[in-house]
Amino acid sequence: MSPAPRLVVLLLVARIAASQTLSNAGRNFTVVFPENIAYYYPSDARNKIWVTALHNDTSVMVSSANSQLNAGQTKSFTVTQELGRLTINETNASDPFKVFNISDKTVHITSNKDIIVQAISSKGRSTQSVLVIPTTKLSNKYFIPPVPEIEGTTSGASPVANVTERAPFRLIIVNPNELKASVTIKGGEEISIDIESGSAAQIWVKNDNKTWYVEANKGVAVFFSHPCAVQHQCTCGLLHAMVPPAKNNTMRFPIPPVLDQPVSILRSDKETRERITFGSSSAVVESAGTAIVYWPGLLLTLVPVEEFGSCFVVQFIEGKENILIIVVNKNHQQGIHIGNDPLEGAEWQELKGTEYSSTNRSISSTTVVWHAAANMTVYQIYKQNDTWFGNPAAVISANPDFRGCVSTPEVTKILQEAESWQESIRSCKNQTLDLISLPSEALQKQTCQNLRGNDAKQVWIGTRRSSLTGDWYWLDESDFNNTNWAGSEPGDVSEGQCAVMSLEGDGDCGWKDRNCCEDARPLCYAAPQILQIN
């Protein structure tokens, strides 16, 4: 392969790979439900798993239940498995923070095509939701967040292990792998444990300023949880959030004005483990590990700028107020859509000290949120009476597209060999692609932008003159209305019956007519799949 097409293909492959890495979609998940509102609450928890299919003919297995879903369909599965109490015995009473509790009460979810998985646990007024990360995207290192200051739970007197409201926070470490995982908690005296496949371990978290972290020989999931943290008016409820993996570099976490209330940021990386109090005017925190918002009833894992996406699935919960918090660069407030509708009438609040802004919007059904030209992040927040809970919305793609929420990225590929226009059609077909048709101005601009930075001079595109009428037409039979001819192009019929797109310099990729028998590299294409929620 010559250098120019190799560069083009590598750039496009890297773009798709980056999008897939940031996506929360996958085919293998393990879900765990923590103890919710103590052992004595007089009703069972209502635990549910939501599975959203991104493609047609998706076969989903949740434990022993099998379902067939098409793209955009969401199915709810009721689950009875729940982790039990974390207790100590007399032999461990001298140092309860070393006590592990191992449980096999986890739920395994598999599918033949990519899906999104979210979980919700509800017991009385205590409700928490979490976005479940696929097994292939888990990490082997996590920084443990500091314990939030909660009157009646963590502040004042020392924790009391067997008094639920006064018990310490706990870590839940899940091994979704086929083989046993060796896990160590480091930062002080090391604590090690082996966790069998499909099991979850629980351990209490020390409330000190030391930097603690989890390290494993395989990818594991780590959750930060309390079954009955005091909230309002002496009530208590579950607090639960997924801990994000340790980062390779320090990242910036814009902080939206959550609920227009002062909040605490639980920040932890290799340098620091601290609680930071932020008001609504404070707007950014930096970390190479964990950054979690705490407000009574709410643990919200923040998303760094480097992990913003362009397309999200947000789950609607009946009987609760459903609110989206959208954070985007203040230069890209236009282009956001909720479902098929552009976001209009938004009241934007600038995040002080950053180039980002935030807005809130209520929703009334499960939907997609997407940006036509830029990346952003979306949080889904729910309110029930005076209690709030929520989590980051599920990322489908980090590749913005003017057509909608992309579940399968478009393919744009310049082939190796220069050949005639007719041979180019066949060569693209051999790769299950088509010689590209460019009927819209938006697609023309997006394609031109995607191909910048390569050394190819011109490529065949899928248009030619009709031998019968002399009119130009597209191979995919789209209307030939929006054109991008270069100056003085096209010429008359004798000058050329087919067209190339120029990729020279930093121009606008104008078209030129050419003799169909001349040689040029084919520009092959497959359109993306756009997700519509049913």
Image: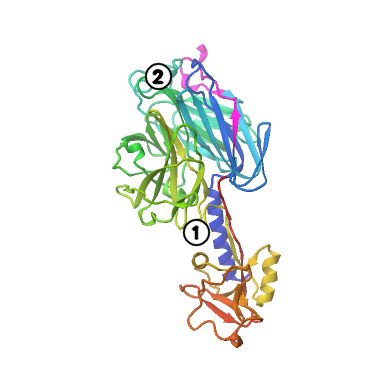
Residue 119 in sight here:
yes
| Horizontal arrangement in the rendering, residue 61 relative to residue 403 (left or right) | right
The residue under label 1 is which amino acid type? Phe
Residue at image coords 45%, 35%: 390
Q: Which residue carries the number 1 mark?
A: 402
| Res. 69 image quadrant | top right
The residue under label 2 is which amino acid type? Pro
- Percent across and percent down for residue 257 are 34, 41
Out of 470 and 450, give the one closest to the viewer.
Answer: 470
Instruction: In the displayed orientation, state which residue is furthest to the front.
Output: 469
Location of residue 501 with respect to 339 vertically, above or below: below
Out of 444 and 2, give the one closest to the viewer.
Answer: 444
Residue at image coords 50%, 15%: 42
Magenta region includes residue 78: yes
Quadrant for the N terminus in the image: bottom right
Location of residue 471 with respect to 352 vertically, above or below: below
The number of callouts visible is: 2
Q: Which residues are magenta?
A: 75-101
Dot 1: few (<14), some (14–19), or many (≥20) neighbours within 10 Å?
some
Q: Which residue carries the number 2 mark?
A: 159
Residue 169 in sight here:
no
- Percent across and percent down for residue 527 are 59, 60
- Percent across and percent down for residue 409 are 57, 56
**Mark-to-mark CA distance, 2 and 1:** 53 Å
**Which numbered disc flags the more N-terminal residue, 2 or 1?**
2
Q: Nearer the viewer, mark 2 or mark 1?
A: 1
Out of 225 and 115, give the one closest to the viewer.
Answer: 115
- Percent across and percent down for residue 406 are 55, 53
Dot 2: few (<14), some (14–19), or many (≥20) neighbours within 10 Å?
some
